[in-house]
Image (cartoon, helix red, strand yellow):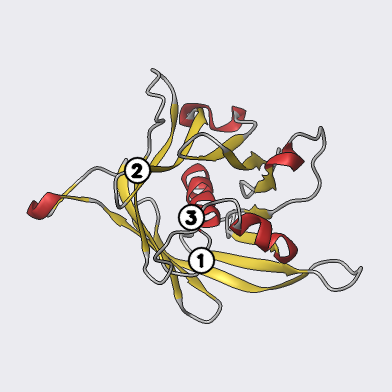
Amino acid sequence: MQVHYTESRREAAESSIERPKNIDKPRAFTVWRKSSMGFQGTDGFSVFDDSGMLAFRVDNYSRRQKYLTKEIVLMDGAGKPLLCLRPRIMSLRDRWNAYEVAECRKKQPTSKLFSMRRYSMLQNVDKAEVSLAKLEDDSKPKLVPGFRTEGCFEKRSCKIYNCKGEEVAQISRKTSGNASVLLGNDVFSLVIRPGFDCTLVMAFVIVLDRIR
Protein backbone atom coordinates (compact mmCIF):
# COMPACT_ATOMS: atom_id res chain seq x y z
CA MET A 1 0.00 0.00 0.00
CA GLN A 2 1.27 3.44 -0.89
CA VAL A 3 0.11 6.90 0.13
CA HIS A 4 0.76 10.00 -1.96
CA TYR A 5 0.27 13.13 0.17
CA THR A 6 0.38 16.66 -1.25
CA GLU A 7 2.85 18.56 0.96
CA SER A 8 1.43 21.95 0.02
CA ARG A 9 -1.82 21.01 1.75
CA ARG A 10 -0.20 19.97 5.03
CA GLU A 11 -1.17 23.18 6.85
CA ALA A 12 -4.79 22.88 5.74
CA ALA A 13 -4.97 19.33 7.02
CA GLU A 14 -3.34 20.15 10.33
CA SER A 15 -5.67 23.09 10.93
CA SER A 16 -8.75 20.88 10.50
CA ILE A 17 -8.69 19.87 14.18
CA GLU A 18 -8.18 21.78 17.40
CA ARG A 19 -4.67 21.43 18.75
CA PRO A 20 -4.49 19.96 22.26
CA LYS A 21 -3.02 22.03 25.09
CA ASN A 22 -0.41 19.41 25.97
CA ILE A 23 1.11 19.02 22.51
CA ASP A 24 4.26 17.44 23.94
CA LYS A 25 2.35 14.37 25.08
CA PRO A 26 1.08 11.48 22.93
CA ARG A 27 -2.63 11.52 22.05
CA ALA A 28 -4.42 8.36 23.15
CA PHE A 29 -7.71 7.35 21.49
CA THR A 30 -10.14 4.48 21.84
CA VAL A 31 -11.50 3.48 18.43
CA TRP A 32 -14.88 1.76 18.23
CA ARG A 33 -15.86 0.32 14.86
CA LYS A 34 -19.46 1.44 15.17
CA SER A 35 -21.34 4.58 14.23
CA SER A 36 -22.12 6.97 17.08
CA MET A 37 -25.60 7.39 15.58
CA GLY A 38 -26.53 3.87 16.69
CA PHE A 39 -28.94 3.19 13.82
CA GLN A 40 -29.49 -0.46 12.99
CA GLY A 41 -27.43 -1.49 9.98
CA THR A 42 -25.18 1.58 10.16
CA ASP A 43 -21.44 0.99 10.34
CA GLY A 44 -18.75 3.55 10.97
CA PHE A 45 -16.33 4.72 13.63
CA SER A 46 -16.62 6.40 17.02
CA VAL A 47 -13.26 7.64 18.33
CA PHE A 48 -12.90 8.83 21.92
CA ASP A 49 -9.97 10.70 23.44
CA ASP A 50 -8.40 9.87 26.81
CA SER A 51 -10.95 12.05 28.63
CA GLY A 52 -13.87 10.13 27.13
CA MET A 53 -14.91 12.86 24.71
CA LEU A 54 -15.95 11.99 21.16
CA ALA A 55 -13.07 13.22 18.98
CA PHE A 56 -13.83 11.73 15.54
CA ARG A 57 -16.76 9.95 13.94
CA VAL A 58 -17.75 8.26 10.71
CA ASP A 59 -21.45 7.53 10.21
CA ASN A 60 -22.14 7.05 6.55
CA TYR A 61 -21.15 3.66 5.17
CA SER A 62 -21.66 -0.08 5.40
CA ARG A 63 -18.81 -2.60 5.57
CA ARG A 64 -21.10 -5.24 4.06
CA GLN A 65 -21.31 -3.23 0.82
CA LYS A 66 -17.63 -2.50 0.34
CA TYR A 67 -17.72 -1.93 -3.41
CA LEU A 68 -20.86 0.22 -3.32
CA THR A 69 -19.36 2.86 -1.03
CA LYS A 70 -19.07 6.14 -2.92
CA GLU A 71 -17.74 8.37 -0.17
CA ILE A 72 -16.71 8.25 3.49
CA VAL A 73 -16.74 11.49 5.46
CA LEU A 74 -14.46 11.82 8.48
CA MET A 75 -15.95 14.26 11.01
CA ASP A 76 -14.95 15.67 14.35
CA GLY A 77 -16.94 14.81 17.46
CA ALA A 78 -19.46 17.60 16.83
CA GLY A 79 -20.17 16.38 13.30
CA LYS A 80 -18.08 18.92 11.39
CA PRO A 81 -16.72 17.32 8.17
CA LEU A 82 -12.91 17.24 8.12
CA LEU A 83 -12.15 15.40 4.89
CA CYS A 84 -13.69 12.99 2.39
CA LEU A 85 -12.43 9.56 1.33
CA ARG A 86 -13.42 8.11 -2.02
CA PRO A 87 -12.51 4.76 -3.59
CA ARG A 88 -11.11 4.70 -7.08
CA ILE A 89 -13.35 2.62 -9.31
CA MET A 90 -11.79 -0.50 -10.88
CA SER A 91 -8.59 -0.22 -8.86
CA LEU A 92 -6.70 -3.50 -8.55
CA ARG A 93 -5.07 -2.33 -5.32
CA ASP A 94 -8.14 -0.81 -3.63
CA ARG A 95 -6.93 2.76 -4.08
CA TRP A 96 -8.64 5.44 -2.02
CA ASN A 97 -8.29 9.19 -2.51
CA ALA A 98 -8.72 11.83 0.19
CA TYR A 99 -10.02 15.33 -0.52
CA GLU A 100 -10.73 18.45 1.45
CA VAL A 101 -14.45 18.97 2.04
CA ALA A 102 -14.68 21.92 -0.36
CA GLU A 103 -13.03 19.86 -3.11
CA CYS A 104 -15.54 17.05 -2.61
CA ARG A 105 -18.42 19.38 -3.48
CA LYS A 106 -17.17 19.48 -7.06
CA LYS A 107 -18.55 16.97 -9.56
CA GLN A 108 -15.04 15.96 -10.58
CA PRO A 109 -12.61 16.69 -7.71
CA THR A 110 -9.02 16.76 -8.90
CA SER A 111 -6.90 18.15 -6.09
CA LYS A 112 -6.26 15.17 -3.82
CA LEU A 113 -5.02 15.44 -0.26
CA PHE A 114 -3.50 11.95 -0.44
CA SER A 115 -3.94 8.67 -2.28
CA MET A 116 -3.73 5.33 -0.49
CA ARG A 117 -3.62 1.78 -1.80
CA ARG A 118 -2.48 -1.76 -1.12
CA TYR A 119 1.27 -2.39 -1.36
CA SER A 120 0.73 -5.40 -3.64
CA MET A 121 -2.21 -6.90 -5.51
CA LEU A 122 -0.54 -10.32 -5.82
CA GLN A 123 -0.26 -11.19 -2.13
CA ASN A 124 -1.69 -10.22 1.23
CA VAL A 125 1.10 -7.97 2.52
CA ASP A 126 0.65 -6.17 5.83
CA LYS A 127 3.48 -3.73 5.10
CA ALA A 128 2.47 -0.26 3.97
CA GLU A 129 4.50 2.56 2.44
CA VAL A 130 3.79 6.28 2.35
CA SER A 131 5.17 8.62 -0.32
CA LEU A 132 4.84 12.38 0.11
CA ALA A 133 4.24 14.49 -2.99
CA LYS A 134 6.59 17.47 -2.94
CA LEU A 135 5.71 20.28 -5.35
CA GLU A 136 8.60 22.11 -7.02
CA ASP A 137 7.69 25.23 -9.05
CA ASP A 138 5.25 24.26 -11.82
CA SER A 139 6.60 20.76 -12.28
CA LYS A 140 4.75 17.58 -11.45
CA PRO A 141 4.85 16.44 -7.81
CA LYS A 142 7.99 14.51 -6.94
CA LEU A 143 7.44 11.53 -4.67
CA VAL A 144 9.70 11.36 -1.63
CA PRO A 145 9.76 8.77 1.18
CA GLY A 146 7.31 9.59 3.94
CA PHE A 147 5.99 6.84 6.19
CA ARG A 148 5.82 3.07 6.53
CA THR A 149 3.86 0.63 8.66
CA GLU A 150 4.87 -2.59 10.33
CA GLY A 151 2.72 -5.27 11.89
CA CYS A 152 -0.83 -6.38 11.13
CA PHE A 153 -3.81 -4.02 11.27
CA GLU A 154 -6.32 -6.89 11.15
CA LYS A 155 -4.83 -8.28 14.37
CA ARG A 156 -4.68 -4.76 15.86
CA SER A 157 -0.92 -4.90 16.16
CA CYS A 158 0.46 -2.20 13.88
CA LYS A 159 2.82 0.78 14.02
CA ILE A 160 3.40 3.73 11.70
CA TYR A 161 6.91 5.17 11.27
CA ASN A 162 8.20 8.21 9.41
CA CYS A 163 11.14 8.16 7.00
CA LYS A 164 13.53 8.83 9.89
CA GLY A 165 12.42 5.68 11.67
CA GLU A 166 10.54 7.62 14.35
CA GLU A 167 7.30 6.11 15.61
CA VAL A 168 4.26 8.12 14.54
CA ALA A 169 1.36 6.02 15.82
CA GLN A 170 0.58 2.65 17.32
CA ILE A 171 -2.53 0.49 16.95
CA SER A 172 -3.03 -2.20 19.60
CA ARG A 173 -5.66 -4.38 21.24
CA LYS A 174 -7.76 -2.70 23.91
CA THR A 175 -7.81 -4.08 27.45
CA SER A 176 -10.62 -3.79 29.97
CA GLY A 177 -9.62 -2.03 33.20
CA ASN A 178 -6.84 -3.41 35.35
CA ALA A 179 -7.77 -7.02 34.59
CA SER A 180 -5.88 -6.91 31.29
CA VAL A 181 -8.78 -8.65 29.56
CA LEU A 182 -8.45 -8.18 25.81
CA LEU A 183 -11.55 -6.83 24.10
CA GLY A 184 -12.72 -7.81 20.63
CA ASN A 185 -11.26 -6.37 17.43
CA ASP A 186 -14.12 -3.88 17.12
CA VAL A 187 -12.56 -1.84 19.93
CA PHE A 188 -8.87 -0.95 19.82
CA SER A 189 -6.34 1.65 20.97
CA LEU A 190 -4.70 4.30 18.81
CA VAL A 191 -1.79 6.31 20.24
CA ILE A 192 -0.41 9.19 18.13
CA ARG A 193 2.95 10.74 18.97
CA PRO A 194 3.34 14.52 19.46
CA GLY A 195 3.75 16.64 16.34
CA PHE A 196 1.73 14.45 13.97
CA ASP A 197 -1.68 15.24 12.50
CA CYS A 198 -4.37 13.18 14.22
CA THR A 199 -6.87 13.73 11.39
CA LEU A 200 -4.56 12.22 8.76
CA VAL A 201 -3.65 9.27 10.96
CA MET A 202 -7.33 8.56 11.59
CA ALA A 203 -7.96 8.75 7.84
CA PHE A 204 -5.24 6.14 7.32
CA VAL A 205 -6.95 3.89 9.87
CA ILE A 206 -10.27 4.18 8.03
CA VAL A 207 -8.71 3.20 4.71
CA LEU A 208 -6.84 0.32 6.36
CA ASP A 209 -10.20 -0.95 7.58
CA ARG A 210 -11.54 -0.85 4.02
CA ILE A 211 -8.67 -2.51 2.16
CA ARG A 212 -7.50 -5.11 4.68
Q: Amino acid at mark 3?
A: Asn
- Of residues 2 and 161, the one drawn nearer to the viewer in this rendering: 161
Label 1 environment density (alpha carbons within 10 Å; few <14, some 14–19, many ≥20): some
Q: Amino acid at mark 2?
A: Met
Give the Cα separation between the discs numbered 3 and 1: 28 Å
Q: Which mark is residue 53?
A: 2
Q: Earlier in the sequence, mark 1 or mark 2?
A: 2
Q: How many marks?
A: 3
Label 3 environment density (alpha carbons within 10 Å; few <14, some 14–19, many ≥20): few
Q: Amino acid at mark 1?
A: Phe
Which quarter of the picture shows residue 163?
A: bottom right
Give the Cα separation between the discs numbered 2 and 3: 35 Å
Q: Earlier in the sequence, mark 3 or mark 1?
A: 3
Q: Is residue 54 above or below residue 37?
A: below
Label 2 environment density (alpha carbons within 10 Å; few <14, some 14–19, many ≥20): few
- Residue occupying the point 90% across, 69% down: 139
Please name the residue that numbered disc 1 is placed on: 196
Q: Is residue 155 above or below residue 91?
A: below
Q: Position of residue 156 (x, y in %)?
A: 33, 54
Q: Secondary structure at mark 1?
A: loop
Q: Position of residue 197 (x, y in %)?
A: 53, 61
Please name the residue that numbered disc 3 is placed on: 124
